[in-house]
Amino acid sequence: MNKKMGVYRFLSSAILLIALSACSTIPTAVDQKLEDPGFKDVFVHDPSIIKDEETYYILGSHMQFAKTNDLIHWEQLSESVPTNHLIPNIYDELAEAFEFAKTDTLWAGDMIQLDNGKYYIYYSACEGSSPLSVLGVAVSDHVEGPYNNEGIFLKSGITKEDGSAFDATKEPNVIDPHVFYDKEGKLWMVYGSYSGGIFILEMDEETGFPKKGQGYGTKLLGGNHSRIEGPYIQYNEETDYYYLFLSYGGLAADGGYQIRVARSKNPEGPYMDNTGKTMLDAKGKEGTLFDDDSIAPYGTKLIGNHSWETDLALTNAGYVSPGHNSTYFEKETNQYFIIFHTRFPNLGEQHSVRVHPMFFNEEGWPLIAPLRYANEKLTKYTDKQVIGDYKLIFHGRDITEEIKVPTEITINRNGKIEGEYAGKWDWSNDKYVNITLNGITYNGLFISQWDEYQEAQTMAFSGLSENGDTIFMIRNVE
């Protein structure tokens, strides 16, 4: 090991995870050494997370189910609807849902433990090429089941009871639920995919169903078949905002799937992105189908297709179509995580779950750590620790199958940045950093992470500009 590598190995390790506000504190610099954690992966498409005692579980489409005690080493519990053990005799138990939706599988669901101590699976069945869908709920006394079906509470795609026709350009496809408590203890469900957009309903704790008289609920965004789905809402007590995470684009390897976010002071909105645009305007033009150009300016893009190598033909290092996330806040350690599925360069439709630390920048906007979680902890850094040669990725704001490739820059101790982009850098305070490239400033954080591609510990940076552009940086290990 050369001297410079020894310095890298000695770096204190870092961040993420914590919702950082002006009043947050960061521990004094420590020398945490990270080692290869030996990741054990599972495939759960559209993972929704729940924690029960010391175990985390994720439930996804097709009743794919997995668990872990550390968010690093996962165990696959079921792979499909027929093999699941959460809802025994599932085709009999959910016969009405399968028959209505003309399908033999389930799409993205959600798990939650309500204040009554019982566990609830909110399931969705959909025909696939139309919004012929249902939402229902099943209940259990145990997180791993068995769950008993309580029935269907919402349908889409058919003529309504009052005789009016279903309008798929304005009304929702009732799938992709996320059920959560707000800061006042009220229960809500946000849901929707493509079609008429994303909606939210207030729920009844006693029944697990929506409160009566709401119809489809309050519209938050979308419409005219725009490709927006997978809503998930996370409240941050320090910023006092509700963050609405969304997936734009198509989920396939050539679909340009990506994660975006907007925020509001209220669960029902209105939600705004970090450029000040209201998400109610995020919809396709009238008469269009999957009009990505109309929605691309709305929502703060956090991650999309990217590779850490410039030669895309020879690498799997990076993500393709990352999306349909959930998030988790660990109260005991004040850490935030984001959980999503992703595909990879040159691996087609093969997908796997990824957990990344998530933190909030100086303006209170969430950022995703560039690399997956490997038990890193938040700490302070010095100039000496962060200087060096970096690979830089601009995520942009487009919705495309293009894979973003890195450019090279050097962060110098004198505050200057050189390389393919010139600029400067400085500490905004003892935790936040401003990176200015070609006149645009990105506010974010340096972190020390385990880089499975370089097989070493290194520094990384994630930052966001006022224009809604996110960058990732990883330092080259020599």
Image (spheres, helix red, strand yellow):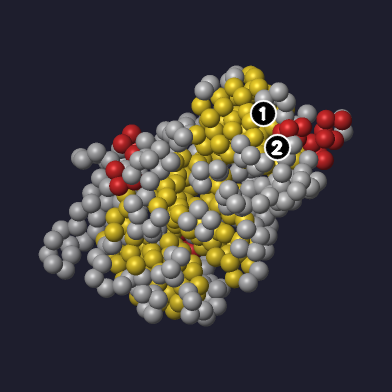
Q: Could you tell me residue 303's position as x and y percent?
A: 51, 40
377 up-or-down from 299: above or below:
below
Residue drawn at x 72%, y 29% is 387
Report helix, strand or loop for mark 1.
strand
Of label 1 and label 2, which has the lower sequence position? 1
Instruction: Give the camera-side residue of 239 and 105.
Output: 239
* Residue type at the position of mark 1: Tyr
Q: Is residue 47 visible?
A: no
Residue labelled with disc 2: 459
Q: Based on the displayed image, in which of its 4 quarters is residue 199 positioned?
A: bottom left
How many badges with numbers are in the image? 2
Q: Based on the displayed image, in which of its 4 quarters is residue 419 positioned?
A: top right
Mark 1: few/some/many CA within 10 Å (<14, 14-19, 20+): many
Cα separation, mark 1 vs mark 2, equals: 9 Å
Residue drawn at x 70%, y 37% is 459
The quadrant of the image that shows the N terminus is: top right
Residue labelled with disc 1: 390
Mark 2: few/some/many CA within 10 Å (<14, 14-19, 20+): many
Residue drawn at x 53%, y 51% is 340
Q: Is residue 210 left or right of residue 386?
A: left
* Residue type at the position of mark 2: Met
Q: Could you tell me residue 101's position as x and y percent?
A: 31, 63
Are the two marked residues, 1 and 2, in contact with CB atoms closer than 8 angstroms? yes
Q: Is residue 470 left or right of residue 288?
A: right
